[in-house]
Every structure is written in C-alpha cells, then in structure tokens.
Amino acid sequence: NMMAKKLIWAGMILVVLMACQQPRKKAEVYSGELPVLEDHFTEVVPLKGVDGLPDTNVVVVGDAPEKQKQYAASLKKLDGLIAEIAQEVDDYEDQPVYWVDIHSGGLVKTLLELNGIPFSYAYTTRYNEYRVDLINPLIEKSGEQQLKIRVFHDRGLDEGDYFFLRVGYAPDIRQRESQPQYLTDSIKVPAYAQDWLTVYWDTTITFQAQVPWDYSERLARATDLRTLPNLEEQVLKKYEQLRQNFIDCDVTEIVKQSAGKVKREYETNYIASGALMLNDIKRDLTIYAPNHPDKVVYPISYYELALYKDGKLVQLRGRENKKGALRTVEYNTNFQEDPFDVNHNFLLYLPEGATELQVY
C-alpha cells in the first residue's frame, strides 16, 4: 500500500510538472500576430518638436511660507471672480439630466466621446471601476446624440476584460435618483472581440436628448486648428501657462483661464447661484493648496497631441493612459493618507476672432 501511494504521488507530481511546462495558450494564439494599437488612434497628430518646450523640470511646490502667501493672495480674489462668472450663468426652469453608468474590469481601457467631444475622464485604470458621470456639459444642443465607445488593450482583449455601459436620464436633476430611466441597452464588448487578437474595439450608439440650451455655435464658428502651421507650439505654450498657475498656487487664475468651461458646467448642471458655485469650488481646494512638503508639479512629458470635433478641439494627453498630460501631486486625507498624483484635463480651442488658444 505504501509503495502504491508513492507511485500515485509521483504520478501526480509528474502531471503537474508536465502541465507547467505546457506553453500558455494566450502566447501561443497571438504571439507575433497582434496589430499595432497606435494605428487606431487616428486623432493623434505627429509631433515635430519645439525648441525649448516643454519645460523638463519637476518643480517642488511644497508647503513653504512663501507659497502659502501666494495661495492666500489668490484666494482673496476668488470670490469676486466667481461672482462675475455667476452673473453670466443662465437659470433654467426645466432641468433634465443625462449620465453614463460605466463598469469596467480586467486590464481593459475605455475612452468615450460625445458628439466628437472627449470625456474629461479617461477610464484607463487597471482595476475594477464603477462610475456614474453626468454628461450634460458635453451635450451642445437638443436632438440626436452620438456616443463613441472605444475599448482597447495593447495585449489583446479577452474574456477576462469586463465592460458595461448604459446612458441614463431623468426629467429633473432634483429627482435623478428617484426617477432614473435608461435610454440605451447595456453595451458590452461582444464575444467575437474577446479573442486575444483584437486590441481595439469601438462602436457608436445614439440617443435623443432635450436640453434648454444651445452651445453648438461656439465650436461651429471656431477655427479649424488643422490650419495652424504652429499648432504644436501654441498648445505647448498654453499648457505651460496653465502649469505655471499650479506652480504659483494661483487658484483664481486657473478658474479664470477656464471661465468658459466653469460657466458651462455649472449652467448645465443647474447651479446658477454665485454662492452655491463658490461653495462648491471652495469645498475642496487641496489640488491647488501648498499643504504638503512633497507637493510637486511634473513636467509635461511622454504626451501626444490629439484633435477632436473635426479639428476644432485639441488636447495633450498621455501616450499610454490617455489622461491629461498636466500632472501634479495632491494631498487630501479624505482620499488617502499619502500624497498622490492627479492628471488635469484641458481641452483647447480657438474661438472666432481670437488669436490665442483658450480652455474649452
């Protein structure tokens, strides 16, 4: 009996060893056959390089008294600026709201565009993630809306990559949670694309939206950036200007540079009160505050230049994670005890009659 047990045990070990020596199915299937992922990102413009741009230094912000004074001086100006912006914000009686539910898992990455305008958030983290993101600011006017869904992974999509999306709606933002409706079926990556060989899958879905505003002329009249001979230089200069505001802890200037965006986001989310706007902005200023010795502003690096909306919008984004290329360190114990990196997304455009790029 003892000899029989030894033989059985030896056989089990041999089977395990043989199994471990078998080639991995994934490598066997796609080795040397994957298409180049970058070929699918047709919105990316080849870079030529600009002498002296961007700055290549990591700048320490820290928490020194000098920075504290800069920050305090900027904060004193914030109330007046928000009051000016609030005067231009329209107040709507009808308040419909639209959003996306998105749940992704595995190593899959996702980018979304609504009517050619990219979402400010890139769903490219490598862990399970569930988000509900309001999309009112991306809706330019009533009518048919086109949502482009882009799912990708440079090593190929497989059955372990999970993706789920649907578009939600409520007739009144004040009853969003009690009156949710869904305008689209649940969108998932089809089984045929989870074959280890597909590195990029995209689809476009449509839905109808009725909103009380019309911003469509803003971009319709804007300059086609593809006609600018020095686009890369202009974009880098603008991003360096925005980056300097973070170095200077100048929260008011950051809001001022983004005044059009701030107005649109509060207006489309039905916050027309200056007091409410100011309270919302001041609720969390740790992004800008010099509140930790390890706070830094990184150089703009390893980026790509992407055009959207038929050349009317441009963005610098990371080559791999597709997040905004302007990166800083934030210290906020409401999220975690240690400082952490934050990517800031800025879309730029050239309004009709303007000579310099502005934040959209």
Image (cartoon, rainbow, N blue to C red):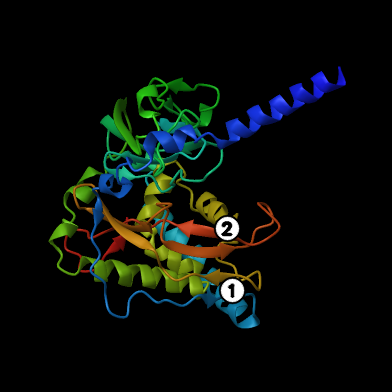
Secondary structure under tag 1 reads: helix
* Residue closest to the eye, 95 or 1: 1
Residue lying at the far front in this picture: please name it: 3
Disc 1 and disc 2: Cα gap in Å?
13 Å
Q: Residues within 10 Å of mark 1 (few under 14, many from 20)?
A: some
Please determine whether, in this image, residue 60 is positioned above or below residue 271.
below
Pointer 1 residue: 72
Coordinates of residue 41 in the picture (x, y in percent): 28, 47
User: x and y percent of residue 279 in the render?
Assistant: 57, 53
Res. 155 visible in picture = yes
Q: Residue sitting at 15 percent across and 64 percent down?
A: 228
Tag shown at residue 282: 2
Q: Is residue 226 left or right of residue 64?
A: left
Q: Write the residue at 49% across / 22% down.
A: 180
Residue 91 shows in the view: no
Tell me the amino acid under the disc marked 1: Ala
Residue drawn at 26 percent across, 72 percent down: 49
Residue 350 higher or lower than 206, as above or below? below
Which quadrant of the view contains residue 10?
top right
| Callout count | 2
Q: Position of residue 143 (x, y in %)?
A: 25, 29
Dot 2: element: helix
- Quarter holding the C terminus is bottom left
Nearer to us in this view, 198 or 205: 198
Residue at the bottom extreme of this rendering: 66
**Residue at the outermost left position:** 227
The amino acid at mark 2 is Lys
